[in-house]
C-alpha cells in the first residue's frame, strides 16, 4: 500500500509553484556600515602599500648603484688604483666620473634614482654640450675628498691604496633634487648635521639614503650612521670610519 503525502499545492490535478516572498533591500544604515568598513580597510592597507612601493624603489636604486660600484671597481683596475674625478676643478665633461664609468658597464649606467622626481636628466652617453643646461646631472654626487686635485690634511686620497679603509669610506651619495649642474659634495665643510643634510638627500628612502663605498659595495643607511661627531665619520678618507685626532 502506497502512502500519499498531502500537498496543498496540488488541486484538481494542477501544480501550483511555490512563490518565494521578496526579500527587503539594504537599508541606508546597512549601506553606510559597509562603506565605513571598506574605508577602514583602505585606511589600514594604503600605508602598507605605500611603504611597499617606497621599499621597491629603494631596492631598484640599490641595484643601480651596485652596477656603478662594479664599474668603479673595473676602472680602478685599469687606472692603477686611482678613482675617477668629479667636475671639481675640471671643465671637460668627458673627464667627469659620470661619463667615465659608463665605459665600464655592458649597459648604460642608470644615474637616476627611481624616487628622484626630477623630470629631465642628462644622458651621459651623449655629449653634454648637446643637452639642456637645466637638466639634472644625476641623483648621486661624488665625495670630492677623493678627487685627484683635492688635498685634505696634507694628503691627496685619489688612490685607493692611500685610503685607510676603503670599505668604510663613502665615495658616492644621493644628492638633493635641487642640484643640477653639480656632481660632488664637500664633507670637510660640514660643521653641523644641518649642513650635512643640506648636501645629501637623506630622506629619499624612508629617512635613509643609499651610498657607494670606495671599495665598490653599496649600503642603505641613516645619515647619522655616516656622520656623527665625535664618533662616526665615513667621509674622511684618511680616518674613516672615525674622526681625525687633532
Image (cartoon, helix red, strand yellow):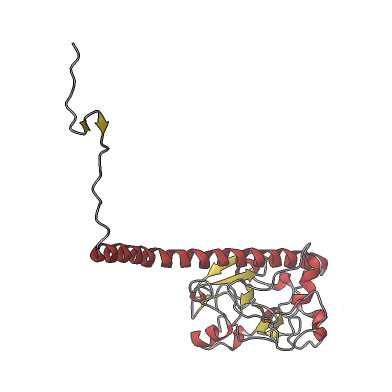
Q: In this orientation, which residue lies closer to the viewer: 203 or 160? A: 203
Q: For this rendering, which residue is in front, 193 or 149? A: 193
Residue, far top: 1
Q: Which residue is depicted at the point 78% across and 87% down?
A: 90
Q: Position of residue 131 (x, y in %)?
A: 78, 84
| In the rendered image, the vertical position of residue 45 relative to residue 140, given as above or below | above
Quadrant hosting residue 10: top left
Q: With respect to residue 41, does 13 lie above or below?
A: above
Residue 74 placement (x, y as % from top left): 77, 64
Horizontal side, residue 10 vs residue 52: left or right: left
Q: Position of residue 243 (x, y in %)?
A: 55, 78
Image location (x, y in percent) of residue 13: 25, 28
Q: Quadrant of the C terminus?
A: bottom right
Left or right: where does residue 30 sit relative to residue 200? left
User: Residue 105: which quarter of the image?
Assistant: bottom right
The N terminus lies in quadrant: top left
Q: Nearer the viewer, residue 45 or 184?
A: 45
- Horizontal relation, residue 224 to residue 185: left or right: left
Give the tally of numbered discs.
Answer: 0
Residue occupying the point 18% across, 17% down: 3
Question: Residue farthest to the front?
Answer: 12
Q: Is residue 120 left or right of residue 105?
A: left
Amino acid at each position: 500500500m502506497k502512502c500519499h503525502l498531502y500537498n496543498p499545492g496540488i488541486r484538481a490535478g494542477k501544480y501550483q509553484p511555490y512563490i518565494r516572498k521578496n526579500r527587503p533591500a539594504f537599508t541606508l544604515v546597512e549601506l553606510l556600515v559597509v562603506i565605513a568598513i571598506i574605508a577602514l580597510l583602505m585606511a589600514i592597507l594604503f600605508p602598507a602599500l605605500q611603504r611597499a612601493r617606497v621599499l621597491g624603489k629603494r631596492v631598484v636604486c640599490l641595484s643601480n648603484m651596485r652596477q656603478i660600484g662594479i664599474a668603479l671597481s673595473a676602472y680602478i683596475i685599469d687606472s692603477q688604483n686611482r678613482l675617477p674625478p668629479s667636475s671639481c676643478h675640471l671643465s671637460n665633461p668627458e673627464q667627469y666620473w659620470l661619463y667615465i664609468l659608463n665605459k665600464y658597464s655592458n649597459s648604460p649606467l642608470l644615474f637616476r634614482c627611481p624616487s628622484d622626481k626630477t623630470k629631465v636628466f642628462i644622458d651621459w652617453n651623449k655629449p653634454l654640450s648637446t643637452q639642456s643646461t637645466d637638466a639634472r646631472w644625476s641623483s648621486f654626487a661624488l665625495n670630492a675628498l677623493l678627487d685627484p686635485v683635492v688635498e685634505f690634511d696634507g694628503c691627496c686620497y685619489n688612490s685607493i691604496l692611500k685610503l685607510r679603509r676603503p670599505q668604510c669610506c663613502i665615495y658616492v651619495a644621493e644628492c638633493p633634487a635641487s642640484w643640477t649642474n653639480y656632481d660632488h659634495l664637500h664633507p670637510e665643510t660640514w660643521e653641523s648635521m644641518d649642513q650635512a643634510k643640506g648636501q645629501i638627500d637623506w630622506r629619499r628612502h624612508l629617512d635613509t639614503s643609499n651610498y657607494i663605498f670606495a671599495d665598490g659595495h653599496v649600503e642603505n643607511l641613516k645619515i647619522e650612521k655616516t656622520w656623527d661627531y665625535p664618533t662616526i665619520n665615513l667621509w674622511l678618507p684618511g680616518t674613516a670610519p672615525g674622526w681625525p685626532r687633532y
